[in-house]
Image (tube, grey):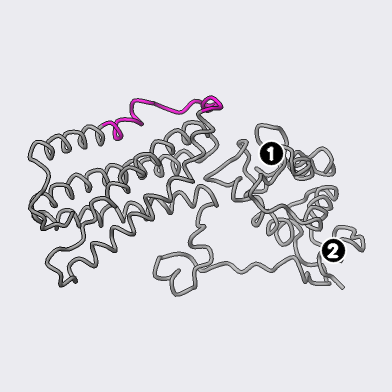
Amino acid sequence: MSESDPQGPSLKGQVLLGVAGLMLIASLAALPFLAGQPPETGLPGLLKFIGRFHPVVLHLPIGMMVWVLLLEAGNPCSKKPARSSSRMAMLFTATTAVIASLLGFILYYSTPDYDKELAGRHLNGGILFACGTVAAFVVKFRVDASGGRGAALYRLLLLGCAGIMGITSHDGASLTHGKGYLSNHAPEPLRKMLGLPAKKVREPAAGADSDGKQVVYTDVIVPILERKCYSCHNAEKQKGKYRMDEYELLLAGGKEGDGIVPGKSAESNALVRIELPEDDDEHMPPEGKKDLEDHEVMLIKWWIDGGASKDARLSDQPMTDAVRSALAIP
Protein backbone atom coordinates (compact mmCIF):
# COMPACT_ATOMS: atom_id res chain seq x y z
CA MET A 1 0.00 0.00 0.00
CA SER A 2 1.28 3.51 -0.75
CA GLU A 3 0.88 6.49 1.54
CA SER A 4 -1.56 8.16 -0.86
CA ASP A 5 -3.79 5.13 -1.26
CA PRO A 6 -7.32 6.19 -0.31
CA GLN A 7 -8.30 2.66 0.68
CA GLY A 8 -6.79 2.73 4.17
CA PRO A 9 -7.63 0.85 7.35
CA SER A 10 -10.87 1.69 9.12
CA LEU A 11 -10.97 3.94 12.17
CA LYS A 12 -11.95 0.96 14.30
CA GLY A 13 -8.90 -0.96 13.09
CA GLN A 14 -6.66 1.97 13.90
CA VAL A 15 -8.06 2.26 17.42
CA LEU A 16 -7.73 -1.48 18.08
CA LEU A 17 -4.16 -1.47 16.84
CA GLY A 18 -3.35 1.55 19.00
CA VAL A 19 -4.78 -0.08 22.13
CA ALA A 20 -2.96 -3.35 21.40
CA GLY A 21 0.29 -1.45 20.85
CA LEU A 22 -0.04 0.44 24.13
CA MET A 23 -0.77 -2.80 26.02
CA LEU A 24 2.28 -4.47 24.48
CA ILE A 25 4.51 -1.51 25.32
CA ALA A 26 3.21 -1.43 28.91
CA SER A 27 3.78 -5.17 29.29
CA LEU A 28 7.36 -4.97 28.01
CA ALA A 29 8.17 -1.99 30.22
CA ALA A 30 6.76 -3.70 33.32
CA LEU A 31 8.53 -7.02 32.72
CA PRO A 32 11.80 -6.29 34.63
CA PHE A 33 9.88 -4.86 37.59
CA LEU A 34 7.55 -7.84 37.78
CA ALA A 35 10.35 -10.39 37.47
CA GLY A 36 12.56 -8.92 40.21
CA GLN A 37 16.22 -9.82 40.60
CA PRO A 38 17.61 -12.80 38.64
CA PRO A 39 18.35 -15.92 40.70
CA GLU A 40 21.99 -16.63 41.55
CA THR A 41 21.83 -20.04 39.88
CA GLY A 42 20.13 -18.77 36.73
CA LEU A 43 17.09 -20.34 35.11
CA PRO A 44 16.32 -24.00 34.21
CA GLY A 45 18.20 -25.59 31.32
CA LEU A 46 15.39 -25.28 28.78
CA LEU A 47 15.09 -21.53 29.35
CA LYS A 48 18.85 -21.17 29.10
CA PHE A 49 18.68 -22.96 25.75
CA ILE A 50 15.92 -20.64 24.51
CA GLY A 51 17.66 -17.50 25.79
CA ARG A 52 20.81 -18.25 23.82
CA PHE A 53 18.94 -17.60 20.59
CA HIS A 54 18.99 -13.90 21.49
CA PRO A 55 22.25 -13.20 19.58
CA VAL A 56 20.75 -14.96 16.55
CA VAL A 57 17.48 -13.03 16.46
CA LEU A 58 18.76 -9.58 17.44
CA HIS A 59 20.37 -8.98 14.05
CA LEU A 60 16.96 -9.13 12.33
CA PRO A 61 15.48 -5.92 13.83
CA ILE A 62 18.83 -4.14 13.45
CA GLY A 63 19.03 -4.94 9.75
CA MET A 64 15.38 -4.11 9.15
CA MET A 65 15.65 -0.82 11.04
CA VAL A 66 18.47 0.20 8.72
CA TRP A 67 16.27 -0.74 5.74
CA VAL A 68 13.34 1.30 7.10
CA LEU A 69 15.62 4.31 7.59
CA LEU A 70 16.84 3.99 4.01
CA LEU A 71 13.27 3.78 2.71
CA GLU A 72 12.23 6.87 4.63
CA ALA A 73 15.38 8.75 3.63
CA GLY A 74 14.53 8.11 -0.01
CA ASN A 75 10.85 9.05 0.21
CA PRO A 76 11.24 12.85 0.42
CA CYS A 77 13.52 12.72 -2.62
CA SER A 78 11.06 10.73 -4.70
CA LYS A 79 9.28 12.52 -7.57
CA LYS A 80 6.60 9.87 -7.80
CA PRO A 81 3.16 10.87 -6.47
CA ALA A 82 2.73 7.50 -4.74
CA ARG A 83 5.73 6.78 -2.60
CA SER A 84 6.71 3.40 -1.21
CA SER A 85 5.46 2.68 2.31
CA SER A 86 7.80 1.20 4.94
CA ARG A 87 4.87 -0.13 6.97
CA MET A 88 5.47 -3.84 6.36
CA ALA A 89 9.20 -3.44 6.96
CA MET A 90 8.37 -1.60 10.20
CA LEU A 91 6.01 -4.41 11.24
CA PHE A 92 8.81 -6.94 10.73
CA THR A 93 11.21 -4.69 12.67
CA ALA A 94 8.82 -4.33 15.62
CA THR A 95 7.96 -8.05 15.69
CA THR A 96 11.57 -9.21 15.69
CA ALA A 97 12.57 -6.49 18.17
CA VAL A 98 9.95 -7.73 20.64
CA ILE A 99 11.10 -11.34 20.19
CA ALA A 100 14.77 -10.35 20.57
CA SER A 101 14.03 -8.37 23.75
CA LEU A 102 12.12 -11.29 25.28
CA LEU A 103 14.95 -13.70 24.45
CA GLY A 104 17.41 -11.17 25.88
CA PHE A 105 15.33 -10.97 29.03
CA ILE A 106 15.50 -14.77 29.41
CA LEU A 107 19.26 -14.75 28.71
CA TYR A 108 19.81 -12.03 31.31
CA TYR A 109 17.95 -14.00 33.96
CA SER A 110 19.64 -17.29 33.08
CA THR A 111 23.24 -15.96 33.01
CA PRO A 112 24.15 -14.27 36.31
CA ASP A 113 27.88 -13.99 35.41
CA TYR A 114 27.55 -10.67 33.59
CA ASP A 115 28.22 -7.29 35.17
CA LYS A 116 24.84 -6.29 36.60
CA GLU A 117 25.04 -2.61 35.71
CA LEU A 118 26.11 -3.07 32.09
CA ALA A 119 23.85 -6.08 31.49
CA GLY A 120 20.91 -4.27 33.08
CA ARG A 121 21.49 -1.22 30.89
CA HIS A 122 21.67 -3.45 27.81
CA LEU A 123 18.45 -5.21 28.80
CA ASN A 124 16.62 -1.94 29.41
CA GLY A 125 17.92 -0.54 26.15
CA GLY A 126 16.64 -3.58 24.26
CA ILE A 127 13.21 -3.29 25.84
CA LEU A 128 13.10 0.46 25.14
CA PHE A 129 14.08 -0.19 21.52
CA ALA A 130 11.31 -2.80 21.18
CA CYS A 131 8.77 -0.40 22.69
CA GLY A 132 9.93 2.33 20.32
CA THR A 133 9.55 0.14 17.25
CA VAL A 134 6.05 -0.91 18.31
CA ALA A 135 5.10 2.75 18.77
CA ALA A 136 6.64 3.60 15.38
CA PHE A 137 4.61 0.88 13.66
CA VAL A 138 1.36 2.07 15.25
CA VAL A 139 2.10 5.65 14.13
CA LYS A 140 3.05 4.44 10.63
CA PHE A 141 -0.24 2.56 10.42
CA ARG A 142 -2.04 5.83 11.18
CA VAL A 143 0.14 7.78 8.72
CA ASP A 144 -0.74 5.44 5.88
CA ALA A 145 -4.43 5.54 6.80
CA SER A 146 -4.51 9.34 6.81
CA GLY A 147 -2.72 9.82 3.52
CA GLY A 148 0.61 10.90 5.00
CA ARG A 149 -0.38 13.08 7.95
CA GLY A 150 1.93 12.53 10.92
CA ALA A 151 4.91 11.40 8.82
CA ALA A 152 7.20 13.79 10.72
CA LEU A 153 6.32 12.12 14.04
CA TYR A 154 6.97 8.71 12.51
CA ARG A 155 10.40 9.74 11.29
CA LEU A 156 11.22 11.29 14.64
CA LEU A 157 10.39 7.98 16.31
CA LEU A 158 12.62 6.19 13.80
CA LEU A 159 15.56 8.45 14.65
CA GLY A 160 14.99 7.86 18.35
CA CYS A 161 14.89 4.10 17.80
CA ALA A 162 18.09 4.27 15.76
CA GLY A 163 19.86 6.15 18.57
CA ILE A 164 18.71 3.65 21.19
CA MET A 165 19.75 0.81 18.87
CA GLY A 166 23.26 2.21 18.56
CA ILE A 167 23.77 2.63 22.31
CA THR A 168 22.27 -0.76 23.11
CA SER A 169 24.36 -2.49 20.44
CA HIS A 170 27.50 -0.93 21.91
CA ASP A 171 26.59 -2.25 25.37
CA GLY A 172 25.93 -5.69 23.88
CA ALA A 173 29.35 -5.71 22.22
CA SER A 174 30.95 -4.69 25.52
CA LEU A 175 29.20 -7.57 27.29
CA THR A 176 30.29 -10.11 24.70
CA HIS A 177 33.79 -8.93 23.88
CA GLY A 178 34.77 -6.70 26.78
CA LYS A 179 34.51 -3.02 27.55
CA GLY A 180 35.80 -0.76 24.83
CA TYR A 181 35.54 -3.43 22.13
CA LEU A 182 34.34 -0.94 19.51
CA SER A 183 36.84 1.75 20.44
CA ASN A 184 40.03 -0.13 21.36
CA HIS A 185 41.49 0.16 17.87
CA ALA A 186 40.04 3.53 16.95
CA PRO A 187 42.57 5.89 15.31
CA GLU A 188 43.93 8.66 17.50
CA PRO A 189 41.94 11.52 15.84
CA LEU A 190 38.68 9.65 16.46
CA ARG A 191 39.73 8.83 20.04
CA LYS A 192 40.26 12.54 20.67
CA MET A 193 36.85 13.38 19.21
CA LEU A 194 35.20 10.81 21.50
CA GLY A 195 37.14 12.01 24.54
CA LEU A 196 38.98 8.69 24.92
CA PRO A 197 42.49 8.48 26.40
CA ALA A 198 45.44 7.95 24.07
CA LYS A 199 45.97 4.31 23.22
CA LYS A 200 48.66 2.61 25.25
CA VAL A 201 51.34 0.92 23.20
CA ARG A 202 52.49 -2.40 24.63
CA GLU A 203 55.61 -4.18 23.49
CA PRO A 204 54.70 -7.63 22.15
CA ALA A 205 56.19 -10.75 23.70
CA ALA A 206 57.62 -11.81 20.36
CA GLY A 207 60.94 -10.13 19.82
CA ALA A 208 61.57 -9.71 23.55
CA ASP A 209 64.76 -7.87 24.42
CA SER A 210 67.72 -10.11 24.96
CA ASP A 211 68.77 -8.04 28.02
CA GLY A 212 65.79 -9.51 29.91
CA LYS A 213 64.41 -6.25 31.31
CA GLN A 214 60.82 -6.97 30.31
CA VAL A 215 58.40 -7.99 33.08
CA VAL A 216 57.12 -11.51 32.46
CA TYR A 217 53.57 -10.95 33.68
CA THR A 218 53.03 -7.54 32.08
CA ASP A 219 54.87 -8.04 28.80
CA VAL A 220 54.39 -11.75 28.12
CA ILE A 221 51.39 -13.15 29.99
CA VAL A 222 48.96 -10.21 29.89
CA PRO A 223 49.02 -9.88 26.05
CA ILE A 224 48.10 -13.58 25.77
CA LEU A 225 45.26 -13.24 28.25
CA GLU A 226 44.02 -10.08 26.52
CA ARG A 227 43.75 -11.89 23.21
CA LYS A 228 42.28 -15.16 24.41
CA CYS A 229 40.67 -14.76 27.86
CA TYR A 230 39.58 -11.23 28.71
CA SER A 231 36.47 -11.29 26.51
CA CYS A 232 34.81 -13.74 28.94
CA HIS A 233 36.59 -12.83 32.18
CA ASN A 234 36.58 -9.08 32.69
CA ALA A 235 34.93 -6.40 34.80
CA GLU A 236 31.69 -6.58 32.78
CA LYS A 237 31.52 -10.34 32.25
CA GLN A 238 32.75 -13.01 34.64
CA LYS A 239 32.16 -16.53 33.36
CA GLY A 240 32.29 -18.80 36.36
CA LYS A 241 32.59 -15.64 38.51
CA TYR A 242 36.22 -15.44 37.42
CA ARG A 243 38.04 -12.27 36.40
CA MET A 244 41.42 -12.49 34.71
CA ASP A 245 42.03 -8.82 33.89
CA GLU A 246 43.69 -8.05 37.24
CA TYR A 247 46.61 -9.93 38.76
CA GLU A 248 45.09 -10.58 42.18
CA LEU A 249 41.79 -11.74 40.68
CA LEU A 250 43.60 -13.95 38.16
CA LEU A 251 45.25 -15.83 41.01
CA ALA A 252 42.14 -15.88 43.21
CA GLY A 253 39.96 -17.70 40.66
CA GLY A 254 36.18 -18.07 40.68
CA LYS A 255 33.59 -20.72 41.48
CA GLU A 256 36.04 -23.54 40.76
CA GLY A 257 38.67 -22.39 43.26
CA ASP A 258 42.13 -20.89 42.83
CA GLY A 259 42.79 -19.74 39.29
CA ILE A 260 46.57 -19.78 39.55
CA VAL A 261 48.63 -21.64 42.16
CA PRO A 262 52.14 -20.12 42.07
CA GLY A 263 54.76 -22.78 41.36
CA LYS A 264 52.15 -25.43 40.53
CA SER A 265 50.77 -25.17 36.99
CA ALA A 266 49.27 -28.68 37.23
CA GLU A 267 47.08 -27.50 40.13
CA SER A 268 46.12 -24.15 38.57
CA ASN A 269 42.50 -24.35 37.50
CA ALA A 270 42.94 -21.80 34.69
CA LEU A 271 45.62 -23.91 33.01
CA VAL A 272 43.81 -27.18 33.70
CA ARG A 273 40.78 -25.84 31.80
CA ILE A 274 42.96 -24.67 28.93
CA GLU A 275 44.58 -28.11 28.54
CA LEU A 276 41.30 -30.09 28.57
CA PRO A 277 40.32 -31.74 25.25
CA GLU A 278 38.50 -29.37 22.90
CA ASP A 279 35.33 -31.49 23.00
CA ASP A 280 35.15 -31.23 26.81
CA ASP A 281 32.40 -28.87 28.01
CA GLU A 282 34.84 -27.38 30.55
CA HIS A 283 37.54 -26.62 27.97
CA MET A 284 38.58 -22.99 27.78
CA PRO A 285 38.28 -20.91 25.73
CA PRO A 286 34.77 -22.17 24.91
CA GLU A 287 33.62 -23.30 21.49
CA GLY A 288 33.61 -20.43 19.03
CA LYS A 289 36.60 -18.71 20.63
CA LYS A 290 40.15 -19.06 19.33
CA ASP A 291 42.23 -21.53 21.33
CA LEU A 292 45.59 -20.66 22.79
CA GLU A 293 48.58 -21.65 20.67
CA ASP A 294 50.91 -24.33 22.02
CA HIS A 295 53.68 -21.79 22.64
CA GLU A 296 51.23 -19.53 24.54
CA VAL A 297 50.23 -22.40 26.83
CA MET A 298 53.90 -23.21 27.36
CA LEU A 299 54.70 -19.61 28.33
CA ILE A 300 51.83 -19.46 30.84
CA LYS A 301 52.95 -22.78 32.35
CA TRP A 302 56.55 -21.51 32.50
CA TRP A 303 55.41 -18.36 34.28
CA ILE A 304 53.29 -20.26 36.82
CA ASP A 305 55.96 -22.87 37.58
CA GLY A 306 58.43 -20.04 38.01
CA GLY A 307 56.33 -18.56 40.81
CA ALA A 308 53.68 -16.55 38.90
CA SER A 309 55.29 -13.31 40.04
CA LYS A 310 53.76 -9.97 39.13
CA ASP A 311 57.12 -8.19 39.00
CA ALA A 312 59.73 -10.76 37.94
CA ARG A 313 61.68 -9.89 34.80
CA LEU A 314 62.73 -12.21 32.03
CA SER A 315 66.25 -12.26 33.40
CA ASP A 316 64.93 -13.48 36.78
CA GLN A 317 63.55 -16.77 35.44
CA PRO A 318 65.54 -19.61 33.92
CA MET A 319 64.71 -20.24 30.27
CA THR A 320 64.80 -23.35 28.17
CA ASP A 321 65.51 -23.19 24.46
CA ALA A 322 61.78 -23.68 23.81
CA VAL A 323 60.91 -20.65 25.96
CA ARG A 324 63.57 -18.52 24.30
CA SER A 325 62.19 -19.57 20.91
CA ALA A 326 58.60 -18.68 21.95
CA LEU A 327 59.81 -15.29 23.11
CA ALA A 328 61.84 -14.87 19.91
CA ILE A 329 65.00 -14.18 21.90
CA PRO A 330 68.12 -15.05 19.92
Q: Kindly indicate the quadrant of the structure image that contains residue 13.
A: top left
Residue range in magenta is 27-46
Residue at the image point whose x is 66% and y is 45% from the top = 287
Farthest residue, direction right: 321
Residue 284: x and y in percent read 70, 44
Q: Are marks 2 and 1 in contact (CB under 8 Å)?
A: no
Q: Is residue 155 above or below residue 285?
A: below
Residue 241 percent across, percent down from the top left: 60, 36
Amino acid bearing label 2: Ser
| In magenta segment, residue 326 | no
Q: Is residue 37 magenta?
A: yes
Inspect the image, locate mark 1, and give the three-letter code of the amino acid beneath it: Ala
Expressed as whole percent of the image width and height from the top left, the position of residue 75 reads 20, 65
Position of 306 with respect to 234 (left or right) is: right
As drawn, the residue found furthest toward the front would be: 7
Q: Nearer the viewer, residue 209 or 110?
A: 110
